């Protein structure tokens, strides 16, 4: 990575660049999405009561947007079948989606931007972060299998291995006493 990577909250003027970035990131970096469903999820989160504008970021390198990621409120479900209360706030946040521009793959940008973002989550006082994805990548930035924290996956798609649902404490013991199921029933596009 040549230059200084900075992250900042996304702004409305960034949305067109974010859409292009997500499309290329998922079309060229995954075998399960062309990115259109990811864009729909981002828009759905932004329009929901779970959106946290201060924790929705772009990463810039030499004044070019090279990454996008956001954290949103994510109440755990008490059952595998779903069901959430109407309170949009929660003690944990969900990290999703995460996108790095295809021209910048494998340059350490994903890990660097997430490390900065995780620090912001800690500053806001949340107790934990959930993410579903490639455990080989997310384990490198401090995530562990969610069931180790009594937080259980329910979807399994597209990541069928249970290690793909992960959590991270924001401080030692912060997830003690928190338990439940990851159910995406509040989102049509998840």
Image (cartoon, rainbow, N blue to C red):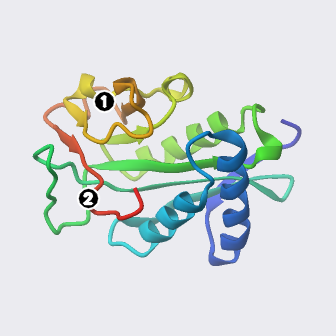
Residue under the image location 17 percent in, 49 percent down: 77
Q: Quadrant of the N terminus?
A: top right
Q: Position of residue 166 (x, y in %)?
A: 38, 32
The residue wearing badge 1 is 146
Question: Considering the numbered disc 2 on the image, is that residue within a helix, a strand or a loop?
Answer: loop
Front-most of residues 167 and 164: 164
Residue under the image location 43 percent in, 66 percent down: 45
Q: Position of residue 8 (x, y in %)?
A: 64, 59
Residue under the image location 52 percent in, 60 percent down: 37
> Which callout, 1 or 2, points at the residue further toward the start of the chain?
1
The residue wearing badge 2 is 185
Q: Which mark is residue 22?
A: none
Q: Quadrant of the C terminus?
A: bottom left
Q: Position of residue 93 (x, y in %)?
A: 35, 50
Residue 51 lies, with reference to residue 107, above or below; the image says: below
Residue under the image location 19 percent in, 29 percent down: 150
Is the C-beta separation of discs 1 and 2 under 8 Å? Answer: no
Q: Residues within 10 Å of mark 1 (few under 14, many from 20)?
A: many
Q: Position of residue 11 (x, y in %)?
A: 63, 72
Whether residue 54 appears in this view of the structure is: no
């Amino acid at each position: 990575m040549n230059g200084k990577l900075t992250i900042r909250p996304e702004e409305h003027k960034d949305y067109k660049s974010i859409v292009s970035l997500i499309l290329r990131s998922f079309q060229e970096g995954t075998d399960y999405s062309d990115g259109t469903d990811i864009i729909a999820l981002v828009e759905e989160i932004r329009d929901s009561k779970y959106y946290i504008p201060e924790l929705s970021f772009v990463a810039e390198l030499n004044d070019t947007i090279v990454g996008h990621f956001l954290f949103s409120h994510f109440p755990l479900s008490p059952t595998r079948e779903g069901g959430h209360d109407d309170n949009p706030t929660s003690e944990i946040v969900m990290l999703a989606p995460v996108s790095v521009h295809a021209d910048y793959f494998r340059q350490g940008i994903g890990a660097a931007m997430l490390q900065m973002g995780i620090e912001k989550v800690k500053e806001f006082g949340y107790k934990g972060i959930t993410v579903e994805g490639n455990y080989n990548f997310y384990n490198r930035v401090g995530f562990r299998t969610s069931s180790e924290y009594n937080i259980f996956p329910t979807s399994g798609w597209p990541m069928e291995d249970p290690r793909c649902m992960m959590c991270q404490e924001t401080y030692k013991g912060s997830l003690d006493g928190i338990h439940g199921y990851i159910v995406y029933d509040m989102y049509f596009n998840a």
